[in-house]
Image: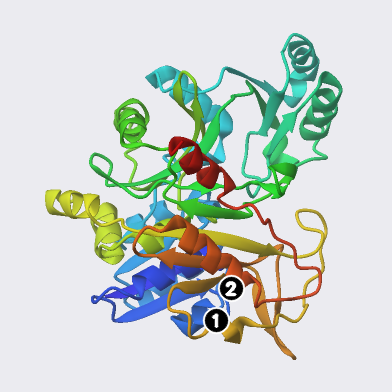
Amino acid sequence: MNVLVIGSGGREHALVWSLSRSPNITKLLCAPGNPGIAQLAECVPLKIFDNEALETFAESRAVDLTIVGPEAPLAGGIVDLFQQRGLTIFGPAQASAELEWSKAFAKQFMATHGIPTAGYHVFSAVEIEAARSYVGKCGFPLVLKADGLAAGKGVVICPNREDALQILEEMLGGKAFGKAGARVVIEEFLEGVEASVFVVTDGFRHVTLASAQDHKRVLDGDNGKNTGGMGAYAPTPFVTETILSQVETEIVIPVIRGMAQEGRVYRGCLYVGLMLTASGPKVVEFNCRFGDPETQVVLPLYGGDLLQLLLESAQGRISEKMIVASKMASRGAAVCVVLASGGYPDAYKTGIPIYGLEALAGRTNVVAFHSGTAVGDSGLVTNGGRVLGITAIDPTGNFQGALAAAYGAVDCIRFEGMHFRRDIGARAIMSVENAGR
């Protein structure tokens, strides 16, 4: 098969890396890709927002399956266009992807279908006085979310009323997140442990992949600003078999069924961001594609044929054989540490030389997924806020081994201003240690 992956980050590198292991790949393409992806696939200089150009390219190169990495093309209706032209594409249609591109829609959908989530209220810019009044009656901390897409940074946890009112003004006034903040979801703060669950669905049946835990805050100890993700590990000990069963019964199946009932049959990857509270798992957010950086730890643990799974999803026919096989396919443990540019998640410089990646060449259990890199005059240079995702895999499931391998690899790499979290997976270690006492 000829396969096209759309995107240029660490998630897309992980997708390409996983797909390249399929025995059924003839030609692997990526638009636009990055220097890491270029080692595995042919990269083509097309913009992810140019649906027409991407469709024309897929048709001209006889692409059998297109896989959409980032959220923006999904929100822009790329799946609808490809399907109208008779091309097979993995991902939800624009109406289905509203679960991600509108936080307000997602909250209303969950309320309609009885899916557990935090209490909330939605306000637009013309309702700013009512929003101020509502904040005045809330307890703290309080969560404010931009309704639209904000590159994973549209969520602010406000510790007090003063901060909440300031963020509210910035969001609804257009200073923070632009059009994405034209509506704001104000919701209660949930106490608990965060976790992520990915499912691949054909609109009716689904396959559940390994659970994971992301690290959103920029600093150790979950301090500092929210980012796109500073690291992840899988599986997480917090998502037990009992909790996973509860998530599927109370969240995943009702979402898939509810979308079908509303005429929005959902095909693709559904990312369920969870808070594991004292009263059970609740939805923090939905993503309508593979998450980043969780993909960099979840896919390396999937031992099945990812190409076949995504193809069956896109064709609306996940087989019983695939469901049974996938239940046995995720094995081992994986850890990803994100190396970020100095200043990230605020302003940062690019074009800074990266050194040391060659030292990882012989390490079969380590992969350096490129998130924000480019080739400059001096070789590989930084080209984004999150630069590399260093992932280590232990096929035996030795989490401590994967953790040590990941940080051992990190020690080999350097670039000016590089920073990273040194506590990826610390909660998992503490949980296992406490369970053993």
Does 13 sit left or right of 342 as displayed?
left
Q: Is residue 98 visible?
A: no
Does 233 sit left or right of 324 as displayed?
right
Give coordinates of residue 130: x percent, y percent.
76, 13
Does 111 sit left or right of 317 as displayed?
right
Q: Using the image, determine if residue 177 lies above or below residue 73.
A: above
Q: Is residue 139 visible?
A: yes
Q: Using the image, determine if residue 43 lies above or below residue 280.
A: below
**Is residue 179 or residue 319 the one in the foreground?**
319
Image quadrant holding the N terminus, namely bottom left
Q: Regarding mark 2 in the picture, which secondary structure is present there?
A: helix
The residue pinned by badge 1 equals 360
10 Å neighbourhood of mark 2: few (<14), some, or many (≥20)?
many
Give coordinates of residue 36: x percent, y percent.
54, 78
Is there a contact, CB below 8 Å, between mark 1 and mark 2?
yes
**Is residue 413 or residue 123 the one in the foreground?**
413
Q: Residue at x 54, y 74 (%)?
A: 33
Q: Residue at x 76, y 28 (%)?
A: 158
**Is residue 385 or residue 82 the one in the foreground?**
385
Quarter assignment of residue 65 = bottom left
Give coordinates of residue 64: x percent, y percent.
29, 70
Disc on res. 427 = none
**Is residue 373 or residue 365 the one in the foreground?**
365
Q: Regarding mark 1 in the picture, which secondary structure is present there?
A: helix
Amino acid, disc 2: Ala
Marks 1 and 2 sit apart, C-alpha to C-alpha, by 7 Å
Give coordinates of residue 274: x percent, y percent.
49, 34
Does 299 sit left or right of 39 as displayed?
left
Disc on res. 409 = 2
